[in-house]
Amino acid sequence: MVKKVLKSSFIGTGAAVIISSIVMMIIDIANGGSLDFQNYQYTKMFFGDLIVGLGFGIPSLIYENENIPYPIQIVFHMGIGCAVMLVVAFSVGWIPSGGGAPVIILSVAGEIAVAFLIRKVILLHYKKEAEQINRKLKAKHE
């Protein structure tokens, strides 16, 4: 079990750091090559990435339990992950609070949408992998 937790943690934190790096590159390009971090903002964001990665990675272990219905697994995994992400997002400044309620609502909705999009991409990857394994098994038995 420890090995599974470590693997899940590593995958989650790795994915979070990669996604954050891509977002930072996009922001850098959009700002004409100018990123300005003060008061350890980058360090806070990096540790926020790690926490978000753990917030999504560790709860993903629920999919190992076949006794829990799949919709409940999704609610558990994504509920914890999104809750952790939103707490971190407000804490480290990923969600701009100075723009008023519309900006906050759009930012929160955007972050949740991205989380579900990433989940969908991962789900499609595993579905494709399962189909390939099934084809190989079927070919082996024919």
Image (cartoon, rainbow, N blue to C red):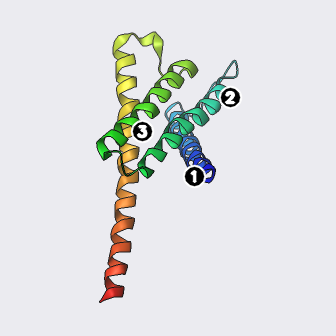
Seen at 37% across and 30% down, the residue is 110
Q: CA distance from mark 1 to mark 3?
A: 15 Å
**24 displayed left or right of 43:** left
Task: Point out residue 128 in the picture as x, y percentages from the top left corner.
Answer: 35, 64
Q: Is residue 6 visible?
A: yes
Q: CA distance from mark 2 to mark 1?
A: 28 Å
Seen at 37% across and 52% down, the residue is 66
Point out the tag, 2 or 1, that comes first from the N-terminus: 1
Q: Residue furthest bottom?
A: 142
Point out the tag, 1 or 3, that comes first from the N-terminus: 1
Seen at 35% across and 19% down, the residue is 105
Whether residue 97 is situated above or below residue 63 in the rendered picture: above
Q: Amino acid at mark 3?
A: His
What residue would you read off at disc 2? 43
Task: Point out residue 119 in the picture as x, y percentages from the top left corner.
Answer: 39, 45
Q: CA distance from mark 3 to mark 2?
A: 26 Å
What residue would you read off at disc 3? 77
Q: Amino acid at mark 1?
A: Lys
Task: Point out residue 85 in the picture as x, y percentages from the top left corner.
Answer: 49, 29
Task: Point out residue 29 in the picture as x, y percentages from the top left corner.
Answer: 52, 37
- Which label was assigned to residue 4? 1
Q: Amino acid at mark 2?
A: Thr
Q: Secondary structure at mark 1?
A: helix
Q: Is residue 24 visible?
A: no
Which image quadrant for residue 127? bottom left
